[in-house]
Image (cartoon, grey):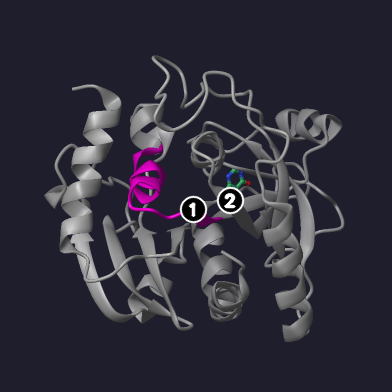
Amino acid sequence: MENYKKIKTAADYVGGLLPGKPVIGMTLGSGLGMLADTLEDPVEIGYESIPGFPVSTVKGHEGKFVYGGLSGRKVLAMKGRFHYFEGYEMKQVVMGVLLMKLLGINDVILTNAAGGINASFSEGCLMLITDHIGFIGPSPLRGLNIEELGPRFPDMSEVYCRRHIAKAEECAAEMGMDIERGIYCYALGPQYETPAEIRAMRILGADAVGMSTVPEAVAANHAGMNVLGISCITNMAAGMVDKPLSHAEVMETTERVRGQFMEYIKRIVKKLEV
Ligand code: HPA
């Protein structure tokens, strides 16, 4: 089936199960899925029930959409996302965010866990993504262009919405919380980077590195959506500290900062101008 029709079929199915219209979409990264469990009057839709939708394979990543109330707004959260390293095609990686678009959502919050490359960062800090380096991986827009969504050669001058970044900074200030800003560099994974790769990324201007978000952000921007990207710096990147990287450490840090991160997202959802 043509890709657009496939997304439309999935979106029509999900839309048919929702009692209202979501205004903000969210993709919850490693360890942050719990936020979806706090939505009011939740409606859950497992990915496996959606026609043509991929299914999540990562341990600890449940695969479902959760619709519900958050800070007085209706949101649609993806609990569990698709990563290229799992074996999915880029088209599948971005299907969730495009489904949101077809449901009428124009504003999306993408969260992730990332390694810190900027030496002034510390484990557990949060970073607003101001731009990304994504030419490391294939484009989610490769193939026949979906004209219904956007142009063949889309501009990427402002993938991360400046208005939303400013609002997110305001929210951090209101909470008395430190917030970093920086450039997220995409890594295909699943292996963590080598110290030499991290040095190369630093030379290119990266502040953080991670294995998600960039494909979704590119697809969302192509489709005219406003993106807010937030990284939780779960560890300092390879070679910056004298210890091996592990998924356990990533999960430990997300667990430690989860409470604050969730409060932050709640405030952002309340204040975002959509
Ligand atoms: N590298 C890539 N992805 C990550 C990292 C990292 O150091 N930490 C969390 N996700």
Query: Horizontal placement of 49 versus 124: left or right?
Result: left
Q: Residues within 10 Å of mark 1 (few under 14, many from 20)?
A: many
Quick one: SS at disc 2?
strand
Residue holding disc 2? 226
Q: Quadrant of the C terminus?
A: bottom right
Q: Position of residue 55 (x, y in %)?
A: 23, 44
| Magenta stretch encompasses residue 99 | yes
61 shown above or below 270: above
- Label 1 to label 2: alpha-carbon separation: 6 Å
Residue type at tag 2: Asn
**Going by the picture, which residue comes out furthest to the front?**
148
| Magenta stretch encompasses residue 192 | no
Residue 53 visible in the picture = no
Q: Position of residue 188 (x, y in %)?
A: 53, 31
**Going by the picture, which residue comes out furthest to the top?**
143
Residue type at tag 1: Asn
Given contact means CB atoms under 8 Å apart, are the residues at marks 1 and 2 in contact? yes
Count numbered badges in the picture: 2
Instruction: Report the residue at 59% width, 51% height from top.
Output: 227
Q: Is mark 1 within 8 Å of ligand 1?
A: no
The magenta-colored residue range is: 94-111
Instruction: Report the residue at 35% width, 55% height from top.
Output: 80
Mark before the other along the chain sequence, 1 or 2: 1
Q: Position of residue 82 (x, y in %)?
A: 37, 42
Residue holding disc 1? 106
